[in-house]
Image (spheres, rainbow, N blue to C red):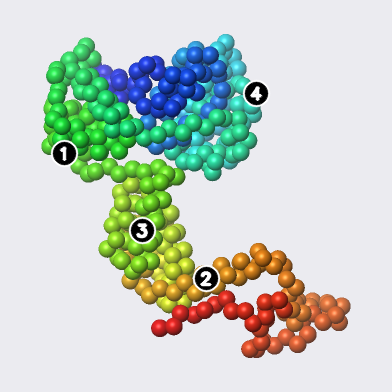
Amino acid sequence: MPEVIPLATSLRPESLSDFFGQTHLVGANKPLAVAIKKKHLFSMIFWGPPGVGKTTLARIYAHALKANFAELSAVSAGKADIKSIIEAAKGGDQPTVLFLDEIHRFNKAQQDFLLPFVERGILTLIGATTENPSFEVIAPLLSRCRVFVLSELSNDEISHIIDRALTALSPSHRHPERSRGIKIDPDTRDWLIAVANGDARQIINLLDNCFRLYKKITLESLKNTLQSRFLRFDKQGEEHYNTISAFIKSLRASNPDAALYYLARLVESGEDPLFIARRLVIFASEDIGLAQPTALVVANAVFQAVNTIGYPECAINLAHGAAYLALAKKDRSSYDGLRAAQADVKQFGNLPIPLELRNAPTKLLKKIGYGKGYEMYTDKSLLPDQLKGKNYLHEKKD
């Protein structure tokens, strides 16, 4: 049985001339184009959403500079894998480029282990990440890499990639079963562009799978192949924060319908359920607080359930918690009081604590007045003298 090569593999560009997108990096006189032209080898990090060409650019760069190309995924790789590549690099005549996909998945110890080999030039590192490298990559390693931000592909670029994919779905010595001359109507093209959401790999795989299943490309066959709309957002990108913001603001507005909708978007986008659960725990104290103290108990129970169960069923627990918190009465007085007190701490610094409140474990401290006059139950202000009579907690009246 002949080997079936995935369409995404057969379409992968081998040079910048065949590469679509990222013109701010690969266009004339742009950084990567210049680096390749001048044979300048240096470590870098590609930061951008999935399917925009991070792996492909790394391969093109290494090939153009005649470097050995080693590829690892930080999800599954460990020190032993890096050691193996390092040993090969030390004994080779050509430079070695290590492409580390999802570099943000490497913990600090793993990144520390990698650092000296990058410093000494044994490896040229190309990291790829969908997360903000400022937060996910240790400072010493980040300082030795140039960060390039990759953008989602435009609709025109996705349209060109669709055309290339359709052309490739035709007879060849590798794919004799494919038919020539596949055409799609404008509505199907628009639908594909919308589903792609700037992700070339997503749309190439969809076309490939659709043709394998149905031997044709129509809007109906594509929808049957996809089954459900694929939602994606970069966890450090604008859409991530917009969706989280809409979710929290819907809870705050006591609007369970909107809260459940934005929760569904988070879930379908693959957001970490524990991240959502943590936000519910914070919300219970920040926005509900004294109005319904049991909200914190419920939110914490949701967090524990999510931690125990995981996806997909834990989405039910999240929905339960979100609906409960949306419908609960709201009171931000404890949160606002904390922020007001913090503002005074920042403004006045460490004001002297009243003597009566100070710890007096020795006779000397008692002699100089520590703890003198302390009453367990008193109406007196216990604040430092400069803040006497100040109120931080303004309880909400029903």
Determine which residue is flagged by label 1.
Answer: 224
Helix or strand or loop: what does disc 1 sit on?
helix
Q: Amino acid at mark 3?
A: Phe
Image height check: is 125 above or below 136?
above
Q: CA distance from mark 1 to mark 3?
A: 30 Å
Quarter-of-image position of residue 174: top left
Query: In which quadrant of the rendered image does the C terminus lie?
Result: bottom left
Identify the residue at horizontal 62%, vertical 26% (top origin): 117
In front: label 2 or label 1: 2
In terms of depth relative to the viewer, which is nearer, 239 or 27?
Answer: 27
Disc number lying in front (2 or 4) = 2
Q: Is residue 84 visible?
A: no
Assess whether mark 4 and mark 3 are in contact (beta carbons under 8 angstroms). Answer: no
Query: In which quarter of the view is residue 135 placed?
Result: top right
Side (left or right) of 77 relative to 247: right
- Decide: is 22 above or below 289: above
Q: Amino acid at mark 1?
A: Asn
Q: Say which label, 3 or 4, has the lower sequence index.
A: 4
Q: Which residue is mark 2?
A: 336
Q: Amino acid at mark 2?
A: Asp
Residue for badge 3: 247
